[in-house]
Image: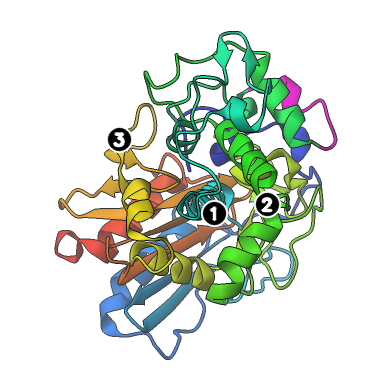
Amino acid sequence: MHQRATHTDRGRPGAAAAAAEAAGAVSAGAVSAPAPTSVVDGHAAIQRVLDQAVAQGGLPGILAEIRDGEQRWFGTAGVADTATGRMRLAQDRFRIGSISKTFVATVMLQLAAEGTLSLDDTADQWLPGMVRGHDHDGGRVTVRMLLNHTSGIFNCTDDQEAQSGHETYTPELLVQIAMSHPAAFAPGTGWGYSNTNYVLAGMIIERATGRALAHEIAERITRPLGLTATYLPIGSDPAIDGPHSRHYTKLFRTDPGAPVHDATELDSSTFWAAGGMISTAEDLNRFFSALLGGRILPPDQQRDMFTSIPTRDWIPHATYGLGVSSVMLPCGETVWGMGGALFGSWSYTYGTRDGEHMVTANVNGDWADGGWDDPIGIFTDLLRTTFCPSDT
């Protein structure tokens, strides 16, 4: 999701990873889609948040899907493409960043349930000698520590120079980048968001199964759940298959006049298991509803996934489990899910602990004006409006 520093979820793995071709200027005015037939009066406040994100936040476009049991509502404001003015659609695909981690953790927990591996296995047991150097010790780092970010392993996407020095990346190269830096802390003694943890988790899944991570995600999650628009790209494929919004970035410059670039075509090998997946709002709501509702993992693994610990230097009032997080809202309501960001695409999927009430939102720009620090502020307003209606 979003670390208050440089990493995949913050979308800052190095400017060379994003397409630098300048896009047209982003419109400051809200262009809302016609109200879907499923809109009811109770969603008017949510639509206002979407409109404000474009009109005040200066974003190209935003979309959101609310799922309440079997009922769904979709809303949007702004545009999918600043050149054509096309509106964002419910079927539009987008890069989901570190929401990918939830899929990876789910596969790992399924393997644990099957007895293929244990959460107490060490990195060295599956990847001998891979986690070594600068106080990194793979003999002390467990699978559980990788999944809940307590390993202390350096975050590979914090090395901006290394991240911009290659055209494509292998998981091994990403781990080598991390190993060239000191560990953040001894294994199990702290908490620190690190994309390297999930690169290693993806490598362990491939070693344990003998199959590609993309295959395991498809066979175990996306096909059984009918998530037809959700996938992990193979290798360095820069395209987004199927209908999609353009993704716009200011390369994390904060001044309102910063140039806007089109980052839709992006080499996702930099992110892979840590944040390379593509999906839609409908698919994400369906996945998290099933996951939160206990329909994907056995009870023991469900308990493992949602056993969470306080975070540090991350988002306020959050805890982190195994690939999932919780956020306590100002009204006292706690929601569960995950978020993620890459160049030009920020996403949030959160809901009630039983998975009955979900919201997924995506913005196709990585900035926010109008008093918001970044899109997280917009998402927080959306969560409050959805789950704390008496406060808004």
Amino acid at circle 1: Val
Q: Which coloring applies here?
A: rainbow
**Element under label 2?**
helix
Q: Position of residue 183 (x, y in %)?
A: 54, 14
Q: Position of residue 233 (x, y in %)?
A: 74, 56
Q: What label does residue 213 carry, if any?
A: 2
Mark 3 crowdedness (10 Å alpha carbons): few <14, some 14-19, many ≥20: some
Do we see residue 255 in this rendering? no
Does the residue at mark 2 contact the one at mark 3 (Cβ under 8 Å)?
no
Do we see residue 23 in this rendering? yes
Q: CA distance from mark 1 to mark 2?
A: 9 Å
Identify the residue position indicated by label 1 in the image.
Answer: 107
At a point 40% along the width and 52% down the height, the residue shown is 378
Does the residue at mark 1 contact the one at mark 2 (Cβ under 8 Å)?
yes
Mark 1 crowdedness (10 Å alpha carbons): few <14, some 14-19, many ≥20: many
Amino acid at circle 3: Ile
Magenta: main secondary structure: loop
Amino acid at circle 2: Leu
Q: Nearer the viewer, residue 39 or 100?
A: 100
**Element under label 1?**
helix
Q: Nearer the viewer, residue 360 or 139?
A: 139
Q: Nearer the viewer, mark 3 or mark 1?
A: 1
- 247 left or right of 63? right
- 293 left or right of 96? left
- Residue 179, compared with residue 248, is above or below; it is above
Q: What label does residue 309 carry, if any?
A: 3
Q: Quadrant of residue 311?
A: top left
Q: Nearer the viewer, mark 2 or mark 3?
A: 2
- Which range of residues does the magenta coloring cover? 159-168
Q: Quadrant of residue 318?
A: top left
**Element under label 3?**
strand
